[in-house]
Image: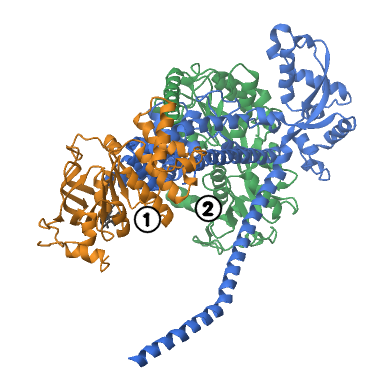
Amino acid sequence: MNNSEYKQKALDKSSSGRTIEMVNKSLSRRYKAERRFRRYGQVAIIISLGFLCLLFISIISKGYPAFYQTFIQIDVFLDPDVLPKDKLSTANYPGLIKKSLSSEFPEVELRREKKQLYGMVSIGAYYQIRKMVMKNRDMIGTTQTVWVPVDDDIDMLAKGHIDRNTPELERRVKDIQLAWFDRWDKAGKIKKRFNTTFFTSGDSREPEMSGIWGAMAGSLYVLVVTLLLSFPIGVAAAVYLEEFASKSRWVDLIEVNINNLAAVPSIVFGLLGLAIFINFFGLPRSAPLVGGLVLTLMTLPIIIIASRAALQSVPPSIRQAALGVGASKMQTVFHHVFPLALPGILTGTIIGISRALGETAPLLMIGMVAFIVDVPGSFTDPSTVLPVQIYLWADSPERAFVERTSAAILVLLALLIATNFLAVLLRNRFERRW
Amino acid sequence: METNESTGQKGFQTVGETKVENPRMTCRDVNVYYGDKHAIKHVGIDIGRNQVIAMIGPSGCGKSTFIRCLNRMNDTIPRCRVTGEILLDDTNIYDRDIDVVPLRAQVGMVFQKPNPFPKSIYDNVAYGPRIHGLAQNKAELDEYVETSLKRAGLWEEVKDRLDHSGTSLSGGQQQRLCIARTIAVSPEVILMDEPCSALDPIATAKIEGLIDELRTHYTIVIVTHSMQQAARVSQRTAYFHMGDLVEVGITDKVFTNPRHKLTEDYITGRFG
Amino acid sequence: MIRIIVVLAAAFTTFTFWTCTQSESRNYVSIVGSSTVYPFAAVVAEQFGRTTRFRTPILESTGSGGGIKLFCSGVGLEHPDIANASRRIKKSEVDRCRENGVNEIIEVKIGYDGIVLASSRKNPPMSISRKDIFLALAKEIPDLSGAEKLIANPHKTWKDVNSSLPDTKIEVLGPPPTSGTRDAFVELAMEGGAKTFSWIKDLKKKDKSRYKAICHTIREDGAFIEAGENDNLIIQKLEANPDAVGIFGFSFLEQNTDKIQGSSVDGFEPNFGSIAKGDYPVSRPLFMYVKKSHVGVIPGIKNYIEEFTSDKAWGEDGYLADKGMIPMPKEEREKYYNDARYLVPIEIK
Ligand SMILES: Nc1ncnc2c1ncn2[C@@H]1O[C@H](COP(=O)(O)OP(=O)(O)O)[C@@H](O)[C@H]1O
Ligand SMILES: [Mg+2]
């Protein structure tokens, strides 16, 4: 007995000595593994950051020139004969500009060359003069010096996108136009200005007259509808399911369905929207109201799932504390649980809304993928949204739309960053620790 | 004394004095089931006025389950079912037409882990009076907060920082804040489920002293896993074992002279 | 906070439904249809909206088939007024229209579109025939020995197809099957080439579905690459790879003549003249279909058509030509101008 006890002790001793030895031996290997893992992580982050940078650099460098537009200075004689006081709105404004251009280059006589000359100025110039005259009738009879936008091809030339060395036949800007341009340029009559049109007007087939304001207003209307419907409905559903509904097979069934809905391709919601809101309820096509309703269907599951997760993560001790002092279920939820879950709910909502902001597929079905010039002024005006605008421009043949596409992407990104920033702000405002 | 623990059939005879004169609460044949699990078996016990009664027993024996019956906190647990009757001043709190909201104002509860709301100290204490509409104006509410904090022995420590978050206090202070929050609604009975198990000895001593003082105003039911604590703060002690109430009696007697074998095993440390 | 949101949402919902019940009329023209016609129709719509008192029409690019389907779904405000198509309306579609109460449809041919095979300017231009196109791109081609049976397309380079063509790998970037351009290309170029084999041509009467399968199935072994709907992308790829050939609408060639050149097909170069005359074989007419019953109900339909059919729009020097549409000859223009003007509905038997 004594003997075995002694043996046991010796074993303990030697084994504890061996343990330390083995621990020490494996130590360097373990540290190495840890260092290796850290390096993998760093490399992964560098790679993803690299791609992000690449994306941003390419989009910004492509899109940034679209924020500037080339203008040309011309002297327009506001001929009272062309501008009868009673027919100002339908007067021949193109004629005024053409006359002004002809008087600047009197040597141009050939019909083809004249056309090329007139084509250097954007047709937006006509509308600009029209607006100017209608606003200030006293100008009629005088000569005004105005800066008007140039045609998109000339704009591309000014921005260096057109190679002067290619043979004339293969160039969108002809030799004679190059000569005129250089003459104007030398006289200081060509200038690049901030492109306000881009931020204030709707779509156009003329790149120099196109803007994203129409699409942006559409996006905002759609988002307002989506937010106002999906947030209260989604949160109410989540609170009910999580806090009030007794666990039954029905609740399980609903839960499975909601999770499935979140994975449904968005175009399906578009088809649903077409069938319900347009064909059944007779709401107008292309309207932000319908777009918002469709995107609500799409964002609801996301918000419900995120809200339920947020509610679940509120510690049960808080609920018990409130119930323990005699708060009703409702008071417990709305005084304590909901405020604590709010940051998570907001995050989920923002994720849902950001996704909605970038969606085009479901809108195709309800007619929001459309060419719309007028800026929408209400929830039922036909309109399109930013990602659709990007898609439409990316598909346009004119070279000048390439930079506008990137510029629109920039605006969309800015909007997304702004919403995310707002989410962070809200979250910090509501965030409490327990 | 025909013990039939495994089936939980009626027949286990509680030893000691389950009844007292003029009780505040009376439990008769209380059973609790979690689904199929029979967690509390035919428990009958009186809770005397302005007394501290301690519930002891090995963990998992059903102390928390039982104490939660007293203010119907078990209602919030899905699949939990309670039968039998529990009278609070002659009304059965399990009657159909009893509203749990006023009941919980009468029977307050302090939990094992301090759980102040993530709000200011003031708001923590004022929450109960606010939702029950006890105070007519701000001054009255201030009054409630001050007396409650004073009774909970916390006033001196926090009176200059009532606007600080309740969660910024130390563990012991948090627990006293929770007690203040409970007594702010002037309950008749305070239930405490292992209130000191998460605290250090000094904080524990403070709470124990506090419990002794509170006894003059309130009836207190305390669950504890520490027999010393039970001996120090309680007048009566109840010993639970696997859902059965084994023995009830005057604390001193239970500890010095246990009548049941199981109680004896437990307090002499041979069990649990 | 919750209360505010709920009240806001409720108020908003009632408000919108109220406005919807109020807005009984539509005061803009709704146009749907072909993505090929889309850029042309968009210019007209914009011009129309800016220079008249009417609102700018709304234009949806749905593809010819999708557009006609919407167009034929009924009479009423929720249905479009005009459908654009890069092919003539089919008998089955007219029947469908009739079923839904759309009885009178005015057909206006608006011009032509050419489909070009273009490549980078870095290599000399190619000159190929429709037969070459078929032999280069079909999944199965007639046996090289001349027997009347099919073999899997063995051609790797253009020289394999026709010894006068360059010795470069066959690498064609084209639109996916959902695109109207692809339909037209398959029908005009591939089928045109397949028909040069008389036994295949005879099949058309005997076994139509087999005939279609032979003519319309493009090889899937990597020689033909589906480059997505975005034609700008194809142009970028052509620039990067001078040996590749791209398939797209003439207007894209028009806008990018500094980077790419069109191959001549059956001896004709793709340009305004050859397409308008009908010499260039891979070209198709473009149409606009107008719902007669909507004229006079929706403001501006008639004026929009007038703008479209004016010489300053669809004429030889019109702004549509600037955008790459190929104008019709003068007589044809006159015919359709009159049809449109007097709202003459089509008769399709
Ligand atoms: N929510 C619950 N659901 C199911 N069983 C429970 C639940 N809470 C407690 N129990 C069971 O009931 C018995 C008593 O638990 P409890 O009252 O917490 O014991 P104690 O507080 O004495 O340690 C235990 O066996 C436990 O597993
Ligand atoms: Mg317990």
Q: Colour of chain A?
A: blue
Query: Which residue type does callout 1 highlight?
Result: Ser
x and y percentages locating residue C86 in the rendered image:
55, 36
Quadrant of residue A195 within the rendered picture: top right
Q: Is residue C157 left or right of residue A314?
A: right
In the orientation shown, which residue stands out farthest toward the bottom? A3
Res A217 label: none
* Chain represented in orange: B
* In the depicted structure, whether residue C77 falls above or below residue B15: above
Q: Nearer the viewer, residue B11 or A160?
A: B11
Q: Is residue C129 left or right of residue C183?
A: right
Q: Numbered disc 1: what chain? A: B
Residue at image point 74% right, 8% down: A84
Q: Quadrant of ligand 1?
A: bottom left
Query: Which residue type does callout 2 highlight?
Result: Ser
**Res B24 seen here:** yes
Quadrant of residue A374 within the rendered picture: top right
* Chain represented in green: C
x and y percentages locating residue A228 in the rendered image:
46, 31
- Please name which of the two marks, 2 or 1, marks the residue nearer to the observer: 1
Residue marked by disc 2: C198
Residue marked by disc 1: B197
Estimate the spatial distance between the alpha carbons at disc 2 and disc 1, rounded to whole Å: 97 Å
